[in-house]
Amino acid sequence: MKKISFKNHLLILISFSFNLSFFSQESINSSGTDIIGIGGNLSYSVGQIFYDSYESTSGTLNAGVQQTYEIINVGLNSNVDQTNFSVFPNPVSENLTISSPNIIKSISYNLYDLKGRLINNGNLFSNETTVNTSNLSSGTYYLNLYNQENNKTQSFKIIKNK
């Protein structure tokens, strides 16, 4: 019987360990990163082929899948004098209409770009006010409504198309 040397044992062991690594978790991603902070770690990937889904009475979690969502009405909703505003059309191309079913008293608006720069402002004098957006570039804007004490009452995300 021929003895196998220590080098051969080591070579076989290393070869075997490399073969096992090919059977680990695998995914083909188009993007992703790891984020490390004081509160913990977060890793995400985009384009993952396989994932696990966990369901409970409070919802569903798809581990490894980035879930998208969009918030249209953001900020405080204190509704001065029980006034509920609506903004349409959204996305807008020419004119944006700010509407309320109730009579408006001392309501103003500010339109901001994504960098927080004030683009347009004015006052609402009737139940429907039209804001000209034809000179704006395509993109995302925020429309904030303020009461007479200059407190923000509602905020809307506006999408501008050409």
Image (cartoon, rainbow, N blue to C red):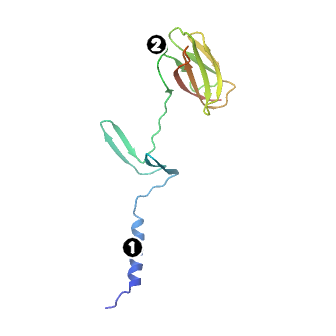
Q: Position of residue 56 (x, y in %)?
A: 30, 39
- Within the image, what quadrant is residue 22 found in? bottom left
What type is the residue that disc 1 sits on? Answer: Phe
- Circle 2 packing at 10 Å, graded few (<14), some (14-19), many (20+), is few
- The quadrant holding residue 143 is top right
Quick check: 33 left or right of 138? left
What residue do we see at 38% from left, 81% from top?
9
Q: Residue furthest left?
A: 57
Please tell me which residue is depicted at 46% across the width and 19% down the height of the picture: 78
Q: Position of residue 81 (x, y in %)?
A: 48, 11
In the image, residue 161 lies at what x, y percent? 62, 29
Q: Please give the label number shown on residue 6.
A: none
Relative to the observer, which residue lies in front, 94 or 116? 116
As drawn, the residue found furthest toward the top would be 103
- Give the percent coordinates (x, y) of residue 76: 48, 23
Badge nearest the viewer, 2 or 1:
2
Residue located farthest toward the right when viewing the structure as drawn: 135
Q: Is 41 located above or below residue 84 in the figure?
A: below
Q: Is residue 143 left or right of residue 56?
A: right
104 w.r.t. 24: above or below: above
What secondary structure is marked by label 2?
helix
- Dot 2 corresponds to which residue? 82
Tell me which residue sits at (53%, 24%) in the image.
155
Mark 2–mark 1 CB contact (< 8 Å): no
Q: Mark 2 vs mark 1: which is more N-terminal?
A: 1
Amino acid at circle 2? Gln
Quick check: 111 left or right of 61? Answer: right
Q: Determine which residue is flagged by label 1.
A: 16
Most foreground residue, 122 or 64: 122
Left or right: residue 42 versus residue 114 is left
Foreground residue, 147 or 102?
147
Separation of residues labelled 2 and 1 (CA atoms): 72 Å
